[in-house]
Structures are given as C-alpha cells and as structure tokens.
Image (spheres, grey):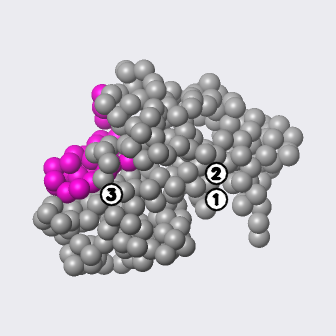
Amino acid sequence: MTSDHSAVVIGGAGFIGARLCATLTDLGVAVLPVTRGDPLPTTAELRAAGTVFMVAGSVTPLTAQQDPGRCAEDLAGLRRLLDRVGDPDGAPHVVLTSSGGTCYDPDSPPPYRETDPVRATTAYAALKLDQERLVAESGLPATVLRLANLYGRGQRAGTGQGVIAHWLDAVGRGEPLPVYGSLDTVRDYLYLDDLMDLLVRLHRSGPVAPVLNVGSGAPTALRDVARLITAATGCAEPALDHAAARPVDRQRFWLDVGLARAALGWLPMTPLAQGIRLTCTALARP
C-alpha cells in the first residue's frame, strides 16, 4: 500500500480525527471525513479506501459509568460500520483506536505488552474490549491501537479526559489544579503528533499486527506533570485542589511499545517536557 490510497476517517471532527484528516491531506491522501452528523459512507465508498480509521467515540471513562446507553450506541455504531464494509476479501484496512490505559488487567504489573491479560474493570474498558472483539470477529484486515493518554494542541479541557489540557486551562484561568487521588499516580502520556506518525505508517503499510500499543513507553507521575506545566507556563507554582481518587482512574500504567517499533519502525519522538511546551504555546495563540 502507498500513500496515494484514500482514507475514510470516522470521527473526522474530533481531537484525533481532525488532526488525522489534516495530516493525510497534507501528504496528498484523498480523505473522506465523517462527523457525527454525517451519514455512514456507503459500502462502495468504504471499500474504495485503503484505510478506514475508526477514531470516533462519544464517551469518556467517567461518562461511560454514568450513561451506559451511550456505550451501547458506540458499540452499535461500530457494528454497523463493520457490517457495511462487508466481505473481508478485498476489504480496506480497518484501524480502531482503543484504550491502553484501561483495558489491561490492573492485577498484572506494567509495562503492559499486547499479550498481557485484559480485564474490564470499568464500563469504559468493557466498551473498548467489546469493540476490539467485534473487530476481531469481523475477519476484516484490521489493527487495534491501544492508546496511552493523548495530549496536544486541539484537545479541549472539560471533557473528562486529558489532565494536561485540563491543567493548562486551569493555570490560564488562575485556578488550582484539580488532583484526584495521589500525585504519585503514574501514567503514560503520548503527544498527538507522534500518534499521527504511527497512523501514517499504518496507512502506508497495511495491517502489521492485530493489536499495537501506542504510547511513550515511559511512566510519569502526576507530580512531574505538574512540575513540567509550571515550567512551561512560567507561572508561580499553582495551588492544588485535592479530591478523592475516582473509581474510573487507573493509578499505575504505562505501555511497552516494542511491537510498534519492530513492526513499523515507529518510536515516539516528543519528550513530555517538549510536548507540554508546544501545547502551551498553541493554547496561547489567539
């Protein structure tokens, strides 16, 4: 497969999808973006594409707990898409974004590899694992991406996801940083541009593995994220607004990304300090 194959992006107006559409278009790839208000593409449109990226989602870990009906709608939407793609023979490469931060069994120690046990401990994890199962059962040429915590320009604060965007917004407003649980909570943060690099490689290569972890591969404590945000903004050290840990939040995870490196030659290139500075600069622009 070469980059002149077209792509369909389901979720083309979202944080991932909008950037993906722009990135592929800049590379000369014909892109059909599909937003929430658009009809699902026809079978002919889907099968004419080299890659169908499924990056849409209407729930966060918090809203999935609060509104199970929306989880059911997201699952049904993916089922309709896969059914419309049709016969696996000659089908496009389907790429589904899933969650590396919620799907792995917390009783297993990080860093998590693609072969490690998975377990749904939240409604959001159950949805993602159900979506992964649908893709596997479809028999279509497909890749599931288990993503770390994404951040970067264009991410909206207040969605229930994205501590970096939320904290940068709080600093800009002169408000305390909300902290749920301990500052020793460890997670894996991936800059959006590094994900774009991997998605372009997948578009060009086609399927290389059923499941790929996509993250920085490095554990970072929340206290270090707060320190880097303070350095990037040049503000005085912000106050912290502590609250109890939420049941939906994992306290300790990071991903092994060795398979993505071996299969695609991909490595994340943006250190967290640099990524936070770039995100901060983008937010400061009028």
Write the residue at 42% across / 77% down.
30
Q: Give amino acid for label 1.
A: Arg
* N-terminal-most mark, 3 or 1: 1
The quadrant the C terminus occupies is: bottom right
Q: Position of residue 153 (x, y in %)?
A: 64, 59
Mark 2 residue element: helix
Q: Which residue is tagged 2?
A: 165
The count of marks equals: 3
Q: Which residue is tagged 3?
A: 206
Q: Position of residue 236 (x, y in %)?
A: 87, 40
Q: Position of residue 187 (x, y in %)?
A: 54, 33
Q: Which residue is tagged 1?
A: 153
Residue placed most toward the observer, 2 or 228: 2
Q: Which residues are magenta?
A: 117-146
Residue 60 seen by the camera: yes
69 part of magenta stretch? no
Image-based side of 28 in relation to 170, left or right: left
Residue 148 seen by the camera: no
Write the residue at 15% across / 61% down.
88
Residue placed most toward the observer, 84 or 250: 84
The quadrant the N terminus occupies is: bottom left
Image-based side of 58 in relation to 154, left or right: left
Image-based side of 10 in relation to 235, left or right: left
Q: Nearer the viewer, mark 3 or mark 1?
A: 3
Q: Nearer the viewer, mark 2 or mark 3?
A: 3
Residue placed most toward the observer, 280 or 139: 139
- State whether residue 18 is above or below residue 142: below
Calculate the distance from the C-alpha at mark 2 to the C-alpha at mark 3.
32 Å
Q: Give amino acid for label 2.
A: Ala
Write the residue at 33% across / 28% down.
116
